[in-house]
Amino acid sequence: MSIRKVPMLINGQEFSSTSSTWVDVLNPATQEVVAQVPFATLEEVDHAVANAKQAFKSWRKVSLAKRQQFLLTFLQLARANTTHIAELITLEHGKTLPDAEGEVGRGIEAIENACMVTKLQLGELADNVAGNVNVYTLNKPLGVGVGITAFNFPIMLPCFMFPIAIACGNTFVLKPSEQDPTSTMFLAKLAYEAGLPPGVLNVVHGGADVANHLAEHEDVKALSFIGSTHVGSSLYRRASNAGIRAQCMMGAKNHCVIMPDANKGQAINHLLGSCFGAAGQRCMANSVAILVGETKHWLPEIVEKAKAMTIDVGTNRAADLGPLVSPQAKQRVEGLIASGVEQGATLLLDGRNPQVDGFDKGNFVAPTIFSEVNTDMDIYAQEIFGPVMCMMEADDIDSAIDIVNANPNGNGTSIFTNSGWNARHYENNIDVGQIGINIPIPVPVAYFSFTGSRASKLGDLGPNGQQAVQFWTQTHTVSARWFEPEEVSEGVNTTITMS
C-alpha cells in the first residue's frame, strides 16, 4: 500500500516537495505509518515567502468588509467540518475524539474573534488639536507573517495565528509540526475553499533548518511561535537580531492551589482533568498540585480517582486519555518518572507500561502521581509533558503563593476556593500571567489575549484579543491640516509648535 505524501501549500496550490528528506507520520496508538511529510528545501521556503510577499501587494488593499466576509465563510466551513478535523487530529496526535473536538471548538473561537476585525482594527482620532489640525492613527498591516506551531494543538495554535494576521491585511507562511500536519493542511485548504486569494496563506513543512530560515528571512516582518522554551528562545533571538517582530509562547510548570474551603469533588475532578487530559501534553496543564492545610488528607481520594481513569485509543469516546504522540515522548516521560523515584519522591501511582488491549505498540502512559516532591527534583524543575502529577503541601495560602512565584515559569495557575477573600488575595499576589479561579485551565476566550509571562513568554504582545491586532499591525500617526482656499500665509515658522 502506498503511503500518502503530505503536500505543501504555496500560492493557493498543493505543492509536492523535491526534498530528499521525508519523515514518517505515525498513529501513536499503533505505530502505523499514516503519511510522510517533507522537510522542505530552503529554496522551497523562499518560494513560499516570495508568493506571500507578492500577494501582500493586493491583499493589503482589500477592504475590511471583504476580509470579514471571507473569514465568516471560513468560519462556517471550519464549523461544518469539525468532526472530520477532529478525526485527523486523533489519528496523528492520539488525543481522544471529544478532546480533539474541543480543540477545534477553541480554534473556531479564534476565527470568530478575527471576524470582528472591522472593529478591532480601528484607529484613534483627535479633532482640532491645533488650528484646523486633526491627528489620527491608522493600524496598517506589516507584510509577510510567519507562524511556527507545536504538535499538541495542530488546529487551535494555527488558529491563534493566521486568521487574525490575514484579517489585518497581512499574508502568511505557516510551518506546522511535522508530527501531525494533516489536520493543519486540511484547515488551510478550507481557507482557500472560502475564497482566499492565492498566496495569502502558505504552508511549508520541516524541522529546525526551515524554522531558523523563516526566523531570519529578510522578507518576513513578524513571527509567532508556540512550543518549547529551548526552540522559542532560539527563534526569538534570531528574529530579533534580524529586525523581525516576534512573540514566543513557550514552556510552563503550572500550579493548582487547593484551599480547605474548596468544593472537594469539583476541585479533585478538575485537577485530574487538567493534569491528565491529552495525556498531559498541554502547556496549560496543572501538573503541580499544592494542597493547603487539611486538603493534604484528600490525597488518597485523588489517587483512587486517578486509578479509575480510562486509558485507551483516542477513538474510544469513553477514554479519558490516549497515547503520547511518539515513542520518544513516552521514553522521556518514563525516564522522568524514574528520576523522581531516584531523587526521593514517593510514587503513589505508577502509570508506566499500562496494558491497553489490542494496542500493545501504543505510546501509552497512564496517570502517575508523586507526593513529597521538592523544587530541586527533575520532575518539578522540568516540564514533563506527560500524565504525571507532582503533589506538594503548604500550610497556608501565602506559603502556596511563595512556591508558585519562586518557579521561573508564568504561563498559568489555578486556585480552588469558595472564599472571595482567598481568590482576591491570590489574584493580587501571584506573579503568573493567566489565573484561574475555580477554573482548571485558565486559557481565556479568544477575544481576550493569551497572557503567559516570565520564562513562559518572550515578546510584549500575546496571541488573540486586542494584543493580536497590535502585534500584526503597525501604527501610522497622521497629523493633517487643510487650509482655506484663500487663506494667507503668516510667513515662515521655524518653531516646532502648531498653533
Image (cartoon, rainbow, N blue to C red):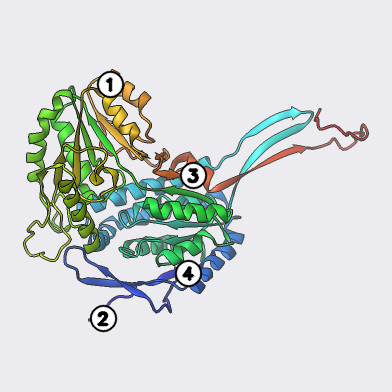
The residue under the point 15% across, 63% down is 362
Q: Which residue is mark 1?
A: 422
The label nearer to you, 3 versus 4, is: 3
The label nearer to you, 4 versus 1, is: 1
In-front residue for pair 273/235: 235
Query: Where, quadrant-wise, is the C terminus in this rendering?
Result: top right
Residue type, label 2: Ser
Spatial CA distance of label 2 from label 3 is 44 Å
Residue type, label 1: Asn
SS at circle 3: loop
Q: Earlier in the sequence, mark 2 or mark 3?
A: 2
Spatial CA distance of label 3 from label 1 is 31 Å
Question: Left of 482 or right of it: where is 234?
Answer: left
Query: Where, quadrant-wise, is the N terminus in this rendering?
Result: bottom left
Spatial CA distance of label 4 from label 2 is 24 Å
SS at circle 2: loop
